Amino acid sequence: MGCCLLFPIKNLPLPSLYYAVARRSSVTWDRYTEKIWRWKDELGRQRRAFYAKYFKGRGTFISLGLLPHFLAMRGTAAAPDDHRKFYAAGRIRHDASVIWQALEQHGPLATLELRHACKMDSQVANIRFKRAMLELQCLLLVVHFGAEQETAAWPSSRVELTSRAFPSETAAARRITPGTARAAIVATYLRWHPGAEPARLARLFGWSKVEAVAAMENPPRRR
């Protein structure tokens, strides 16, 4: 399918891994939930799929085949040290730049380690940290890269720069124009939702209606 959600989200027309496993939309904590909760940690760490909070800030999987097109569409096929360029261009806030720089310097880090490296340890700073992390994930600049047991509570998410976790896909994205990327994403989506209209695609992917129409009218060439 190219991309899907971890759990079904109301009014978000995308498939979910939970529904594929449990065959129901109502989510309860059960053996199916436990299974896919492990998968979200393992798939990213094993570099088998991209996972981050993307669509509406919710857990999203993107296949490796479609990841270059998403990166090209967002214009975020970045190098590990591009945080200064993105910050100077106003594409990310200062806190997001600090997190990015910490990951560049230290490699993948679990949440508490990363907060400490960014000097965002306090309760107030944690609110800033979460907002900045969501900003980076929605731009596909960072990826969930496994989990680590830092405390006696739930395991912490481990985070890595997308450019380092998926270097081949990032390099491929630099050779794809945004228009070509949108066409490939739409072609994949329409195989499962053939009746989708431009307005629906525009809302789902954050495009203008003109961009959605152009993507539908210019399907990618078959190789």
Image (cartoon, rainbow, N blue to C red):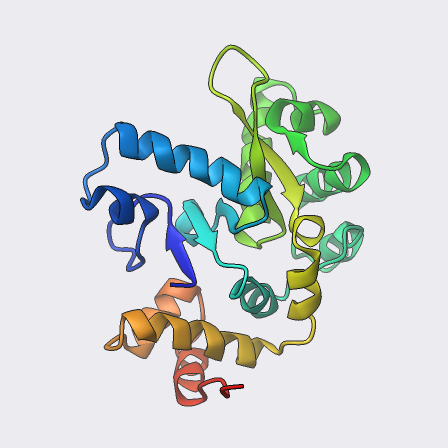
Q: Quadrant of the N terminus?
A: bottom left
| Residue displayed at 23% across by 41% down | 22
| Residue displayed at 70% across by 57% down | 167
| Residue displayed at 58% across by 43% down | 46
Which residue is at the far top? 152
Q: Is residue 42 above or below residue 47?
A: above
User: From where the camera sits, is residue 77 visible?
Assistant: no
| Residue 108 figure quarter | top right
The x and y percentages for residue 5 are 37, 50
| Residue 175 figure quarter | bottom right
- Name the foreground residue: 50 vs 87: 50
Q: Is residue 162 above or below residue 33?
A: below
User: From where the camera sits, is residue 72 visible?
Assistant: yes
The x and y percentages for residue 91 are 65, 57
Q: Quadrant of the C terminus?
A: bottom right
- Name the foreground residue: 130 vs 176: 176
The x and y percentages for residue 215 are 44, 82
| Residue displayed at 50% across by 88% down | 221
| Residue 177 figure quarter | bottom right
The x and y percentages for residue 120 are 66, 25
Q: How many marks?
A: 0
